[in-house]
Amino acid sequence: MHLNLHCQLGHGISGLSLNSSDGSGRSRAIIPLLDLCIKAITTHLHTYQEIILPDELSNKVIHALIRLRKFTDSDLARFMHGDVHTLDLSGWDGRINTKTFYNLGLTCKNVRTAILKGCILLTDKHLTDFFSLSNSVTMLDLSFAKRITDE
């Protein structure tokens, strides 16, 4: 199954909310629509082979998975496609497969911004594999990526 959502994220969608009533006329909860979307995607992530979302939403879902400590390199592969322009994996401290970063370079040739801040298991080999195939990155954040050397 593939999830393909094309929408414009901006000030409008983040302000929408779901308001439910318990029958007494009192409101039970107001939940931002964006939060509901993220929760639905993270809950059912395993049912999708590929997830094509706008960069902003993809990165929000990835960060939700990172916070929940449920993000793996196989999950990363589900989000990678040719239209990804911003890749934000900041704070990911999970195991990173070298093959995943090679495939990331193959699939995401249009990434212009790569934020890998705090990816403590990221190595020079991962970056070499990625940049050997994708050379469109103009902004790279490797802050606190402790295994990266100057080589």
Image (tube, helix red, strand yellow):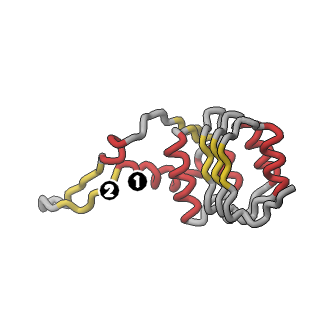
The residue most toward the front is 150
Identify the residue at horizontal 66%, vertical 53% (top origin).
141
For badge 1, the amino acid type reads: Asp
Where disc 2 sits, the SS reads strand
Q: Which residue is drawn at 63% across and 52% down?
A: 115
Secondary element at tag 1: helix
Q: Image quarter for residue 142?
A: bottom right
Q: Quadrant of residue 119?
A: bottom right
Q: How far apart are marks 2 and 1 (CA)?
A: 7 Å
Where residue 68 sits in the image (x, y, percent)? 55, 65
Residues 111 and 72: in front is 111
**Which x, y percent locates residue 126?**
80, 52
**In the displayed structure, would residue 133 be above or below residue 32?**
above
Q: Judge left or right: residue 97 versus residue 32.
A: right
Amino acid type, mark 2: Ile
Residue 32 relative to residue 92: left or right: left
Question: In the rendered view of the protein, which quadrant contains the N terminus?
Answer: top right
Instruction: Specify few, some or many for label 1: CA neighbours under 10 Å numbering under 14, 14-19, or 20 or more.
Output: some
The x, y position of residue 23, in whole percent, is 16, 59
x 56%, y 59%: residue: 65
Quadrant position of the C terminus in the picture = bottom right
| Numbered mark located on residue 100 in the image | none
Q: Are marks 2 and 1 in contact (CB under 8 Å)?
A: yes
Q: Residue at x 27, y 57 (%)?
A: 30
Question: Which of the 4 image quarters holds residue 83?
Answer: top right
Tell whether 72 sits left or right of 28: right
Label annotation for residue 31: 2
Badge 1 is on which residue?
35
Q: Is residue 66 left or right of residue 145?
A: left
Against 9, is 25 above or below? below
